[in-house]
Amino acid sequence: MSIELLSPAGNVEKLYYAYAYGADAAYIGLKKFSLRVKADNFYEDEYKKVIELKKQFPGKRLHCALNISFHNRDIDNFLQNLDYFKAYPIDAFIVQDIGMVPVLQKHFPDAELHVSTQASCVNREAVKMYRSMGFKRVVLGREVTLKEIREIKDAVPDVELEAFAHGAMCIAYAGRCLMSAYLTARSAQAGACSHTCRWDFDVLADPLKAKQIAETGALVLEEKKRPGEYFPIYEGDDFTAVLSSRDLRMVEHLDDMVKAGVDSIKIEGRMKSVYYVALVTRAYRKALDALDGKITAAEAKPFIDELENVSHRESGTGFYYNPAEANVTCSGATDSRYILAAEIGKKLDDDERAQVLKLGKEHAELVQKELDEMHPAARAARLKEYSQHPDRNPPSAEDKAEWNMYEVKPLNMIKAGDAIEFVSPDVVSTKVKPEEWQLVDPENGTLKEWVCDGHNSVIYTKTPLQEGTLIRIEDPEYEEGKIRDSGR
């Protein structure tokens, strides 16, 4: 079995974690030519970092999303930025606008062309047409069933089929939604979707009579933060709810996707966090490895179970088995019991570790020397000050056998007494007691009581850490079974 796992990467950092946690390929957006303009996307000289990442992860592929609807000015702008695009090691372009086909074929003859899901390709004849235009792969519309995928693959076996397996679903057909543009003047087709379908609307009718009223066209929606602004709804025989759809989750059904003829399993989420990219990619990597016989299903299960610890909504199987499944709506908010606290960088080698410990020893000696040279009264006052304010004379890190130091990039506050967890590509999670790790200032070798975003620090621990390890902590405000309005 050779099924590609394709993960989202909204920036260089997420691209690293997509590769590190098991993706065979990742898709990115460049500048303003992607449907996720609110994702960080890639700018300036970041192509240098991307080139280095592809060297670090040989064999990994890079797909570039150019899936907006191009106006004349957009094509002109793209042509003016050709050198910028050519600097990236792009293996494939994802496009919906057929006007871009000859442009890309002329200027990027070695790059593959993939049809975007925005093109709503859901039948064999459309796939044949795209093949004749030079497309190697079709990213199928999310409205296609597994039965239809099998029929398409049988009819056009030489075209690769890519299909979404996980993440947010759009309530509109293949994402072609006017709701955002209508209510906020932010067009989804220009990459500026405001996710209006996930707002908190109130149905202004007796719930028991809502369906009957909807059939008359008299039902309207009112969003809580926009009183007096009404959105009319009409419900027909094949009604699709104009509210937040459930997330897609096919991790338990990958075998069916493979049997249907899917060549690439795709994860949604270029606007999602590093934590989301890492854990969701890891879960699908392990599930595919189990399907391929590389590991057992029992070994994969703990990684799959971790999907519940990533922000998500209620989930379902979308259109794959029964289109009615996709019409089930849910609350728009997402939630998770964990906070991503930090990213682990490189391990300090023996000399670097020894240097940090040396700085700590020198710091302690200097403080002691100052105390020894003080008048007894002044020394007593200084010692009292230190006892009342320990942070003014932090202890130095001591040499601990079998402990190692790693660079750490704090993203949220970590306190020395926290019960942290290490999460890595091949270890589900390792709970670490407070006495099993320390935060150290690499500039003077002293221990830190806390760090947060922007603080230079290393973590000193007895736990061996794999490259790409993350630190998470439990969110104290999380309540089991209660979804907080923490985001859309």
Image (spheres, helix red, strand yellow):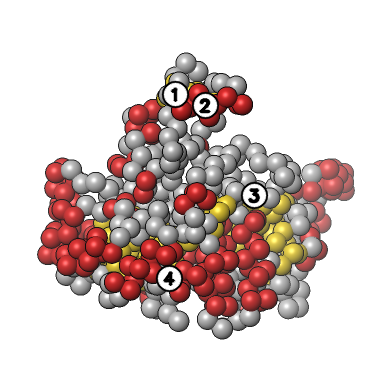
Q: Type of residue at label 2?
A: Gln
Residue with the mark numbered 3: 336
Q: Quadrant of the N terminus?
A: bottom left
N-terminal of the two: label 2 or label 3? 2
Q: Residue furthest top?
A: 228
Q: Are marks 3 and 1 in contact (CB under 8 Å)?
A: no
Q: Which numbered disc, 2 or 3, marks the residue closer to the eye?
A: 2
First in residue order: circle 3 vs circle 1: 1
Q: Position of residue 26 (x, y in %)?
A: 40, 65
Q: CA distance from mark 4 to mark 1?
A: 41 Å
The kind of residue tagged 3 is: Ser
Q: Is residue 68 left or right of residue 211?
A: left
Q: Which residue is mark 4?
A: 260
Q: Is residue 185 left or right of residue 234?
A: left
Disc 4 secondary structure class: helix
- The residue carrying pointer 2 sits among few (fewer than 14), some (14 to 19) or many (20 or more) residues within 10 Å by Cα, namely few
On residue 216, which mark appears?
1
Residues marked 2 and 1 touching at CB (< 8 Å): yes
Residue 329 x, y percent position in the rendering: 54, 42
Q: Residue furthest bottom?
A: 293
Query: Which of pointers 4 and 1 indicates the residue nearer the eye?
Result: 1
Q: Which mark is residue 212?
A: 2
